[in-house]
Image (cartoon, rainbow, N blue to C red):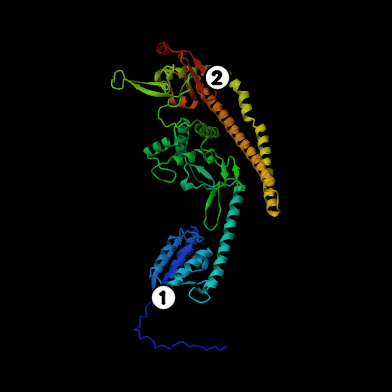
């Protein structure tokens, strides 16, 4: 075998005029928090790189790109960093100087991807602390090693922060996003303190919802009144109202770790559906809403969802008057609308003419409804001593949930046992060959057992909510009765909203007034109703 080397051809150098130019250099500074100490470091970095680059006569100072209070684990939200890279790739920067690899990025993939993009364009990055220049032959190897170390450091910091937060949660320490949380501010001891003006807005929202108003109606009302949202915006959204109505913190309690971070690199958060522990802290801070009212609101959400009711009307009788014959809701109708002298509003069964057989329940006027409510309420005022005596045993029974609690504990243990059995079955099937038909049957049986226990747990929680709502309704009704020692002489909308459930109208003119505490008063037909029926 004969091997002959073919030497490279020698070429004369090209005669090119000198184009020596200043190296365009930019600095990059970043701090990951807004703490005062970090902000001082941030300002120092900016000043340092400005002077450092300007002191080099062979360098042209492009500027210092900055990100303040931004984490380095991802480049997606770092506007200063992204602007710098865009300018470099556009040919405006030849060299980037930064403090260290961890200042540049703690994500190995982002670091290497960015460095390689810049390297393809002949743009270097110099990391002062590690003394690494990416255009050197050993630069990429060192970058890979240092970025991996930085990423692990970020992981460690994230795990320490998570541990610290969960330790605070387990100790019952509560903190709120005060800039976006209406009703509270951070007190001198670090605990939430009620802001009276904002707290009144929260109470109005809860009161209007219990009055039958929809979240969208409440949002429109607050927007029209010029009340700023928790985030300081002018327009309220119905989902903000719903969030406030379902937030247990307004009742002085706190459910901690509602969300958790799934990935320390992306910072993506997920609603906690049992993947990580939660803590429920009762009486953790001053309450704006009484627990009874909060329980009633949660029950009202369930009731509306079950009935499909969408209460948006501003009228107090909307969704409160029902037909005693067919069960349909009554709606308002304007009679003689073109004649101002005869014009009046009546309430009539919405399904009166929807079938071949006309519903026989009569229409009622607003004056008749008001008079019926006054009569029924006054009757209960006169009987309040007997009502209180009868409710003592009922309230005690509603407060006793021990049987439900015992069953719930047993079902929770059942779910844990079945979950472990299912996990073991999957592992055994993965380790050794089994009869797959038998395995599938066994696994499906465990799934059915788990779902049955889980469904029953949901039923128990619903029963608890209903009991709390009934107890709250009774207590609120008793409080209102205690404030009325004399007979009411005028229709009061506030009393109507807080005590009334519905009024049922029957074909013979009878009215049955149903109160929120479960009590009912049957009233014989009024004279006008007798004539209407006749």
Q: Secondary structure at mark 2?
A: helix
Is the Cβ of the residue at disc 1 closer than 8 Å to that at disc 2?
no
Residue drawn where x is 39% and y is 24% of the image: 332
Which residue is more in the foreground, 308 or 339?
A: 308
Q: Height in image: 480 above or below 41?
A: above
Check the picture and name the quadrant holding the N terminus: bottom right
Provide the residue designation for mark 1: 55
Check the picture and name the quadrant holding the C terminus: top left
Which residue is more in the foreground, 63 or 440?
A: 440
Task: Measuring from the top left, give residue 95's x and y in whole percent.
Answer: 43, 72
Q: Height in image: 22 above or below 109?
A: below
Residue drawn where x is 52% and y is 53% of the image: 268
- Tell me the distance, in whole angstroms, between the alpha carbons under discs 1 and 2: 89 Å
Answer left or right for 290 relative to 349. right
Residue drawn where x is 40% and y is 11% of the image: 531
Q: Height in image: 479 above or below 168?
A: above
Residue 48: in sight, yes or no? no
Q: Which mark is residue 96?
A: none
Task: Measuring from the top left, give residue 373's x and y in whole percent.
Answer: 46, 19
Count all numbered tags in the image, as a single digit. Answer: 2
Task: Measuring from the top left, give residue 69's x and y in whole percent.
Answer: 47, 58
Within 10 angstroms of label 1, few (less than 14), some, or many (20 or more) residues? few
Provide the residue designation for mark 2: 384
Task: Measuring from the top left, give residue 89's x and y in whole percent.
Answer: 41, 68
């Amino acid at each position: 075998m004969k091997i002959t080397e073919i030497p490279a051809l020698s070429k004369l150098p090209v005669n090119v005029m000198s184009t020596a130019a200043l190296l365009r250099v930019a600095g990059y500074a970043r701090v990951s928090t807004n703490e005062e100490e970090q902000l001082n470091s941030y300002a120092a970095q900016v000043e340092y790189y400005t002077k450092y680059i300007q002191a080099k006569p062979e360098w042209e100072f492009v500027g210092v790109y900055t990100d303040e209070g931004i984490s380095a684990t991802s480049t997606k939200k770092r506007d200063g960093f992204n602007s710098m890279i865009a300018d470099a790739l556009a040919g405006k920067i030849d060299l980037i100087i930064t403090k260290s690899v961890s200042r540049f990025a703690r994500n190995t993939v982002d670091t290497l991807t960015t460095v390689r993009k810049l390297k393809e364009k002949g743009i270097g990055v110099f990391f002062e602390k590690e003394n690494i220049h990416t255009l050197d032959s050993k630069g990429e190897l060192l970058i890979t090693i240092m970025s991996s170390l930085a990423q692990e450091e970020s992981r460690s910091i994230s795990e320490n922060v998570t541990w610290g937060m969960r330790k605070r949660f387990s100790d019952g320490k509560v903190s709120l996003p005060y800039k976006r949380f209406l009703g509270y501010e951070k007190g001198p001891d670090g605990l939430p303190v009620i802001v009276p003006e904002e707290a009144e807005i929260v109470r109005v929202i809860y009161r209007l919802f219990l009055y039958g108003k929809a979240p969208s109606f409440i949002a429109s009302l607050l927007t029209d009144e010029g009340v700023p949202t928790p985030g300081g915006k002018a327009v309220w959204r119905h989902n903000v109202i719903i969030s406030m109505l379902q937030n247990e913190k307004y009742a002085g309690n706190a459910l901690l770790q509602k969300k958790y971070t799934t990935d320390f690199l992306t910072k993506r958060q997920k609603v906690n559906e049992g993947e990580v522990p939660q803590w429920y802290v009762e009486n953790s801070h001053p309450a704006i809403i009484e627990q009874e009212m909060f329980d009633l609101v949660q029950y009202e959400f369930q009731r509306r969802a079950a009935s499909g009711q969408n209460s948006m009307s501003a009228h107090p009788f909307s969704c409160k008057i029902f037909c005693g014959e067919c069960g349909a809701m009554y709606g308002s109708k304007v009679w003689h609308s073109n004649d101002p002298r005869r014009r009046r509003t009546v309430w009539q069964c919405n399904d009166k003419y929807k079938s071949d057989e006309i519903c026989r329940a009569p229409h009622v006027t607003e004056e008749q409804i008001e008079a019926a409510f006054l009569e029924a309420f006054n009757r209960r005022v006169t009987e309040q001593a007997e009502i209180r005596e009868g409710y003592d045993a009922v309230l005690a029974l509603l407060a006793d949930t021990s049987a439900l609690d015992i069953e719930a504990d047993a079902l929770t243990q059942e779910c844990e046992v079945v979950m472990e059995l299912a996990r073991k079955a999957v592992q055994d099937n993965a380790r050794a060959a089994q009869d797959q038909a038998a395995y599938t049957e066994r696994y499906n049986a465990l799934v059915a057992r788990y779902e049955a226990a889980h469904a029953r747990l949901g039923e128990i929680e619903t029963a608890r909510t209903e009991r709390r709502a009934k107890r709250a309704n009774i207590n609120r009704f008793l409080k209102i009765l205690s404030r009325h020692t004399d007979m009411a002489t005028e229709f009061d909308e506030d009393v109507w909203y807080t005590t009334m459930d519905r009024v049922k109208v029957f074909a013979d003119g009878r009215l049955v007034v149903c109160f929120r505490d479960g009590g009912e008063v049957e009233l014989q037909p009024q004279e006008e109703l007798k004539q209407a029926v006749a």
